[in-house]
Amino acid sequence: ALKEGYEPLTEATAVQLIKDLGYFDAHSSLRCKEIGDGNLNLVFHILDENDKGIIIKQALPYAKVVGESWPLTLHRATIEGNYLKNAIPLVQELVPQVQHTDEAKALTIMEDLSHLDIVRTGFISGKDYPILSQHIGEYLAKTLFFTSDFGCNQQVKKGLQQAFSNPELCKITEDLVFTDPFHVSETNDFEPELIGTVETLWEDDSLKLEVAKLKYKFLTCGEALLHGDLHTGSIFANETTTKVIDPEFAFFGPVGFDIGQFFANLLFQAITRSDEKKDIILFHLHQVWDTFIQTFTELWQTASVEPFTKTEGYLEHVLEGFFHDSIGFAGCELIRRTIGLAHVADLDGIEDSSRRLACKEVAIKLGRELILQRSSISRTNEIVHLLEKVK
Ligand code: ADP
Ligand code: MG
Ligand code: MG
Ligand code: MG
């Protein structure tokens, strides 16, 4: 049942709401455009005559999945607002400023970031964003450390876990990332030429055993508050600035999931870019992990709430586990974005069909190798070696 007070906004009612809340001078003439893709959420971009802007993001009470509408909780707007407002006081410069949230209307009013690029779109057009991986490495280390049992009061954390209970959004990930791509499912979506490769995956019991273990970890391991959807379409950037958006999937899960999703979305660019333009992507792959471990280590040494963090060997053990999980989750993301329901423009946007299919074959093979070999990989360089091997 819908909450009282909820109604999807239109461009006209969005303008009225913004005026009522007093964000613009009563006499200013405002323009408004809905700029979301409309599958899950509405995003209204409102501008005054001086081009000063503001964004309203509103959840819709359904998701369009394979053409049909499925009810989907409006509570995800509250999760998104709470994540942006409260959970990450130490990364404020890396997220949009939130002006207002309204739980009943399922909306968040936030800073307009349209002067920046969505990283996926910029990457596809050949842009580099040199500071991106340092910012994302810091973002990951800080958000994950301060919501983990290493950096967060361990009783407070248990309360936060309840506040960020997000079962309906988690189910989307459980099905679309971990289950459906590895089985015959009507949610899968791949080009007919890939059927041989896909059937080989479905028959690969050694791979399915490893995916089952990764899914179980996602289901059961409440290590830290994850963003939950940290792909390059959830990041705005330019040469000097990075802003992470869209944390509606946030919940307490395994640290490696956020890191692995970012790895995989870099790897789509490593797969598709020409050799001359690829180095910066590989730099980002190394730099995000190096920055993560450096920042996480500093926090471990200076801001720990857990007495065992002083114990020799414990940090190395924890970081090694994060890394292996990240590699495995990256493998799942590579596969699901290639043959599952939600694709990426990095691959689908390649017009030449033989090159597109070749890149998709590489993404699937690299995904499989990462999942199977994750426990014997200890450096980001080895990811690059595996990429070279499957090409
Ligand atoms: P969804 O959850 O539906 O994917 P997003 O939060 O990713 O919604 O937003 C969808 C799109 O809306 C983004 O890709 C971007 O183009 C635009 N958008 C979202 N937030 C902002 C913002 N703060 N400033 C400018 N544009 C935004
Ligand atoms: Mg979208
Ligand atoms: Mg979203
Ligand atoms: Mg999004």
Image (spheres, helix red, strand yellow):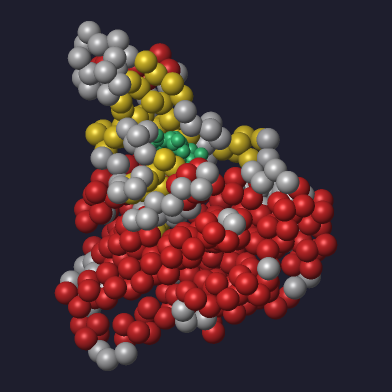
Q: Farthest residue toward the left? A: 302
Q: Is residue 365 left or right of residue 146?
A: right
Q: Farthest residue toward the bottom? A: 312
Q: Quadrant of the C terminus?
A: bottom right
Q: Farthest residue toward the front? A: 276
The mark total stands at 0
Q: Is residue 227 left or right of residue 384?
A: left
Q: Farthest residue toward the top? A: 27
**Residue 102 visible in the snapshot:** no
Which residue is at 25% across, 54% downward?
Answer: 91
Q: Is residue 65 above or below residue 254?
A: above
Task: Give percent across and percent down for residue 124.
Answer: 54, 46
Q: Is residue 260 above or below residue 118?
A: below
User: As rendered, which of 286 and 274 lies closer to the eye?
Assistant: 274
Task: Give percent across and percent down for residue 180.
Answer: 67, 57
**Residue 383 visible in the snapshot:** yes
Q: In the rendered image, which quarter is residue 53 located in?
A: top left
Task: Give percent across and percent down for residue 144.
Answer: 33, 64
Which residue is at 53% across, 78% downward?
Answer: 382
User: As rendered, which of 233 and 346 lies closer to the eye?
Assistant: 346
Which residue is at 37% across, 15% downward?
Answer: 31
Q: In the rendered image, which quarter is residue 54 located in?
A: top left
User: As rendered, which of 315 and 225 lies closer to the eye?
Assistant: 315
Q: Is residue 288 above or below residue 272?
A: below
Which residue is at 63% across, 40% downward?
Answer: 65
